[in-house]
Amino acid sequence: MEYVIEMLNIRKEFGTFVANDNITLQLQKGEIHALLGENGAGKSTLMNVLFGLYQPEGGEIRVRGKKVDIANPNIANELGIGMVHQHFMLVENFSVTENIILGSEPTKYGVTNKKDAAKKVQALSEKYALNVDPYAIIEDISVGMQQRVEILKTLYRGAEILIFDEPTASLTPQEITELIQIMKRLIAEGKSIILITHKLKEIMDVSDRVTVIRKGQGIGTVVTAETNPNDLASLMVGRQVEFTTVKGPAFPGEEILDIKDLVVQDYRGVEKVKSLNLNVRKGEIVGIAGIDGNGQSELIEAITGLRKVKSGTILINGKDVTNMKPRKVTESGVGHIPQDRHKHGLILDFPIGHNISLQTYYTKPISKSGIIDYSKINEKALQVIKDFDVRTQGPSELARSLSGGNQQKAIIGREVDRDPDLLIAALPTRGLDVGAIEFIHSRLIEQRDNGKAVLLISFELDEVMNVSDRIAVIHDGEIVDIVTPENTSEQQLGLLMAGHTSHAESQDLTKKGEDQHVE
Amino acid sequence: MSNKATNLLVPIISVILGLLVGAVIMLVSGYNPLEGYAALWNGIFGDMYTIGETIRQITPYLLAGLAVAFAFRSGLFNIGVEGQLIVGWFAAAYVGVAVELPKVIHLPLAIIAAAVAGALWGFVPGLLKAKFHVHEVIVTIMMNYIALHVTNALIRTVSEGGDRTENIFASASLRSEFLENLTEFSRLHYGIILALIMVGVMWFILEKTTLGFELKAVGFNQNASQYAGMNVNKNIILAMVISGAFAGMAGAMEALGTFEYVSSKGGFTGIGFDGIAVALLGMNTPLGVIFGATLFGSLKYGALNMPNAAGIPIEIVEIVIAVIIFFVASGYIIRLLLLRASAKKKEAK
């Protein structure tokens, strides 16, 4: 078999830290090769070596059998290696074509020639069925579409080998399905793909072979058809992993959170939450399923006091907290794991120990009459770090230098440690690997079993299905239905999330059914 | 190379490089750099008198540096230290000449007046920033001009048409016979003690209080601070008020210590703007500000001796001083060069 890329015994050190140790990855022509590993296992480092951003300390790279020295990304480009980054590198107010030609603008008499470029983009888009409008402005198109622009960018530059870095992290289920089709089409056209991911389901769906790395070590390469998610997970983590979250039945008690006719506007004055009703009781986990942008963020911000409520009421433990300041809401017994841990959850330039006391720094015993006892902050940090298995050098390490999973564990530790009556968890496992996800899910369920109310917001259907006791489906700012995981399926949830009501289907199938087809 | 060695080497190499380039400038201008630097040295450490005067010069730099650094730590760029210093200077001098009180009341009152005036001058941009998101850089720059001309007008009113006030009453003065005797009758005054106490105050606020915790949090990440229930607007205003109070006290040093009056000014004193460099040289930490202010104050004062003792024109002197400070501030570049050099050595092995 012919290999288009061979990375043999790659070793990459940062000071005394070995990020890649003896890793071998061989990419065959026309295959989708998954690179699997936990967060911090060294996947990105390996790919940055291939892309010329880092120089390896050992090993060699061969492209089409020839030994190469990739000193910078330009050389990688010339060799036909293209990278679709996880965080898109696009200029928001430029058009698709402008973004694609950025850095290698074709010129005619010294003037940028966008017309020819746009034609070329159009042709490529048609060839791979990407359906991208070359003249659309980036900020006007969906996240899935922006990703296709990133793909087009690599194709435009003649990439034969495409590296996808966690491509599904910010996509909706529908967009993921479409992306998989695109990847298969790319393969059919003779391209080769390296897929970086820690999502086992995707690997099983799309890849031909899998190379697993763990803690910087190459564990080996397996053929996807000859393995299964369980084996892959244990290869990746180095131990057995539970997949279906183990949980007993819920014993819900009285209402903790009660939302009535809630209306919330976004900063432009557009109503994002429209007369929403929802309650969460003691001892249950209510999951909110929905596609990103249907009012979830505004709902959470309204509950936690970060955004003004236009009308309606929010009761916590029977107490009206509508439009209260965030601190008052927190003190009413609310814990909040925010959806963006870098923007809201952590002060990245503070030590992790300070971050663990971010909600309690002003209270006894840490503070007395305005003076902070930092030894108490330290004590609390050590306890939370231990209880929640936060892997860090210690409380004084900057939050910025922790891995995503450990940052998230610290946030969850901080919020759960205060023992709130209501825990709001927004996308608590976004971007985390199976080990961390398992840990976080079990903590949420533990809170429930301790008689607390948990409100879970997630874009991942299997997370909502696995963890929730009740599922409230949100669409266009309204709860369109409340179902239980036992009596629903991912397909049905998907339909509800897209705005089809299950009642309509069951009650008046013939009449409404026609309407839906028209849509 | 170990981290510690690098940390020590960087400032030393910076100063040496600065001196070398400064020497080249003097050479090509036709002056003797050795004489020039000897004059600079003598201007700083020559005798007890110059040492006293150098420390006196450092005093307002300390407070101006603290003012800038404090705002920086809260994520704000206070370019208005100059204006806050000017209103502080006026307020202290006014209290000093307007009434005569027992020293234990009069001196603190004059200092507090300066701090309050500076705080007020910081409050306005703080409020505008918090409530209307007006950028503090614009407002503070404009407040500098307002300060300059309003105090000039007030001085004319107070002095009935003159361009300086009377000397302040002795009861409001920071002058110290003890320090003067110690330093061969320099103008060194008790202000240095106040300035050093304020270094401690800034450290205490930032490192020990909940207020400092909040100010730093807001400085790093306003979204997360709001999430954690902090009042971001309150903290922005407070940061500007405290910063302004430090700046106002820098003005009090001039009003109550060095000059003992206030005169109308044709332009800015420059101390407030130099405070920005002092704070940045000191990495916005209280201890760092001591280092920055010492460097600035010493060079500024010592340089005055260069035209007299070495016959170098003041313009060349200013260039040389600027070059030295420039190299100290470019420590980052030197650190980078050191790292690259040590990396090369490793490769060669």
Image (spheres, coloured by chain):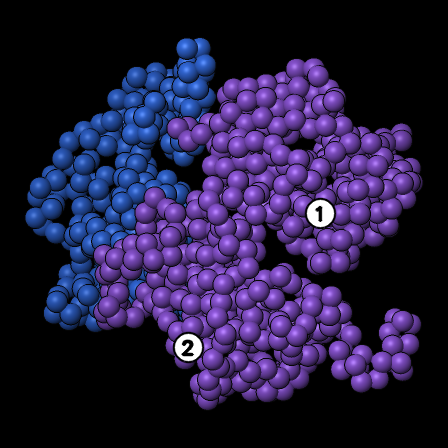
Residue A374: x percent and y percent?
A: 25, 57
Is A165 left or right of A388, judged from the image as shown? right
| Pair 1/2: label in front | 1
Visible residue check, residue A196: no
Using the image as rendered, state which of residue B300 and residue A440 is in the foreground.
A440
Q: Which amino acid is tagged 1?
A: Asp
User: Label 1 marks which chain's residue?
Assistant: A
Label 2 Cα crowd, 10 Å radius (few <14 / some 14-19 / many 20+): some
The numbered mark at residue A310 is none
Disc 2 marks which residue? Answer: A451
As helix, strand or loop, the secondary structure at mark 1 comes to: helix
Disc 1 marks which residue? Answer: A205
As helix, strand or loop, the secondary structure at mark 2 comes to: loop
Point 28% across, 40% down: residue:
B291
Quadrant in the picture for residue B56: top left
Point 84% across, 37% down: residue:
A188
Using the image as rendered, state which of residue A102 and residue A124 is in the foreground.
A124
Quadrant in the picture for residue B4: top left
Q: Which chain is purple?
A: A
Q: Which amino acid is tagged 2?
A: Gly
Point 32% across, 50% down: residue:
A395
Is A247 left or right of B50, judged from the image as shown? right
Point 72% across, 28% down: residue:
A28
Visible residue check, residue B289: yes
Is A519 left or right of A316, judged from the image as shown? right
Q: Quadrant of the N terminus of chain A?
A: top right
Using the image as rendered, state which of residue A356 and residue B331 is in the foreground.
A356
Q: Which chain is blue?
A: B
> On screen, B175 above or below A442?
above
User: Label 2 marks which chain's residue?
Assistant: A
Label 1 Cα crowd, 10 Å radius (few <14 / some 14-19 / many 20+): few
